Image (tube, rainbow, N blue to C red):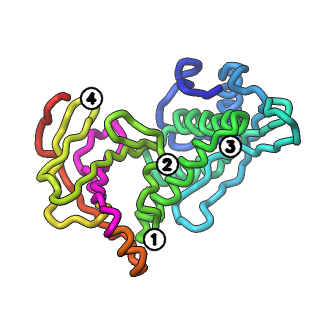
């Protein structure tokens, strides 16, 4: 079972707060946990709210808000009796993020973290690694932002979106291929409307176009232009020990596209 639409079961109160004290946070977390239908909590032994803050081991300013601690027991079949979990929320991490962001929404972030960790448990029951792919994509995205080496295809570990897109967290990537000559513009869907994005003249094999004027109430949008390489060139590169070239350009949308 997947927690596809948690908002159908519970809507957080919402609203920003300067800081939520530990006791108030723990009570809010317990209320949210109890509001989630029992079917989505099957095999979860409980919720733990820790005062500690968990910083990312390598990336400054990145905090772990929660985790799903899961243990599996040998069995011929997977069920809530063989996969047990405890969801842990780190109040200290929430507090540190809130101090860095004046618009931090405690209730919304609590709900998103709680349901994210419950999905980890449900996917463990189903032997599905979908969220592991999302976590991998986020780590690779941070590596890219920090100027480190990264997997050029990391965005494909997100959830497929009709029309050639991939989404994870608040990031939406539209992949477009080109072969002999790149187009002057590519069309993407932005909030249900076709929009045109300009393409720079000099492109790398995998080129990220970061859309600067994406709607503020939607996900961050990027277009990934991928040069389609023939078999002969692939073999030649492999023999020479070569790899794909990477590029990135900031762009702004140029107008309406045509509905397909």
- State the image quarter where residue 207 is shown: bottom left
- Residue at the spot x=36%, y=68% of the render? 234
Q: Evaluate whether residue 218 shows in this view.
A: yes
Q: 10 Å neighbourhood of mark 4: few (<14), some, or many (≥20)?
A: few
Q: CA distance from mark 3 to mark 4?
A: 35 Å
Which of the pair 198/253 is nearer the observer?
198
Q: Which residue lies under the disc numbered 1? A: 149
x%, y% of residue 18? Answer: 51, 43
- State the image quarter where residue 193 is shown: top left
Residue 32 lies within the magenta run:
no
Q: Which residue lies under the disc numbered 2? A: 157
Q: 10 Å neighbourhood of mark 1: few (<14), some, or many (≥20)?
A: few
Pick out the residue farthest to the right.
74
Disc 1 secondary structure class? loop
Q: Which residue lies under the disc numbered 3? A: 89
Mark 3 or 4: in front is 4
Q: Is residue 128 left or right of residue 81?
A: left
Q: Quadrant of the N terminus?
A: top right
Mark 2 or 4: in front is 2
x%, y% of residue 118? Answer: 66, 35
Whether the residues at callouts 1 and 3 have beta carbons within 8 Å, the answer is no
Q: Is residue 213 above or below residue 118?
A: below
Magenta span covers which residues? 208-232
Disc 3 secondary structure class? strand
Q: CA distance from mark 2 to mark 1?
A: 17 Å
Q: CA distance from mark 2 to mark 3?
A: 25 Å
x%, y% of residue 220? Answer: 35, 46
Mark sitting on residue 192: 4
**Closer to the N terminus: mark 3 or mark 4?**
3
Pick out the residue farthest to the front.
232
Residue 226 lies within the magenta run:
yes
């Amino acid at each position: 079972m997947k927690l596809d639409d948690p908002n159908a079961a519970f809507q957080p109160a919402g609203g920003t707060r300067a800081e939520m004290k530990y006791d108030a946070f723990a009570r809010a977390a317990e209320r949210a946990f109890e509001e989630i239908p029992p079917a989505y909590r099957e095999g979860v032994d409980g919720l733990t709210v820790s005062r500690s803050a968990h910083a990312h081991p390598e990336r400054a300013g990145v905090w772990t808000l929660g985790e799903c601690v899961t243990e599996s027991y040998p069995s011929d079949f997977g069920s809530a009796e063989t996969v047990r979990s405890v969801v842990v929320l780190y109040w200290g991490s929430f507090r540190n993020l809130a101090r860095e962001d004046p618009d931090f929404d405690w209730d919304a972030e609590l709900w998103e973290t709680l349901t994210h960790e419950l999905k980890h448990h449900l996917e463990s029951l189903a032997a599905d690694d979908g969220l592991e792919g999302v976590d991998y994509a986020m780590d690779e995205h941070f590596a890219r932002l920090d100027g480190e080496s990264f997997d050029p295809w990391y965005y494909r570990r997100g959830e497929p979106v009709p029309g050639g897109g991939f989404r994870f967290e608040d990031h939406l990537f539209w992949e477009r291929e080109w072969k002999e000559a790149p187009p002057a513009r590519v069309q993407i869907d932005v909030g249900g409307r076709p929009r045109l994005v300009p393409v720079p003249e000099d492109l790398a094999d995998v080129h990220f176009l970061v859309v600067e004027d994406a709607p503020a109430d939607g996900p961050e949008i990027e277009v990934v232009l991928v040069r389609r390489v023939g078999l002969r060139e692939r073999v030649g590169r492999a023999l020479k020990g070569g790899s794909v070239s990477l590029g990135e350009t900031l762009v702004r949308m140029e107008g309406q596209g045509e509905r397909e």
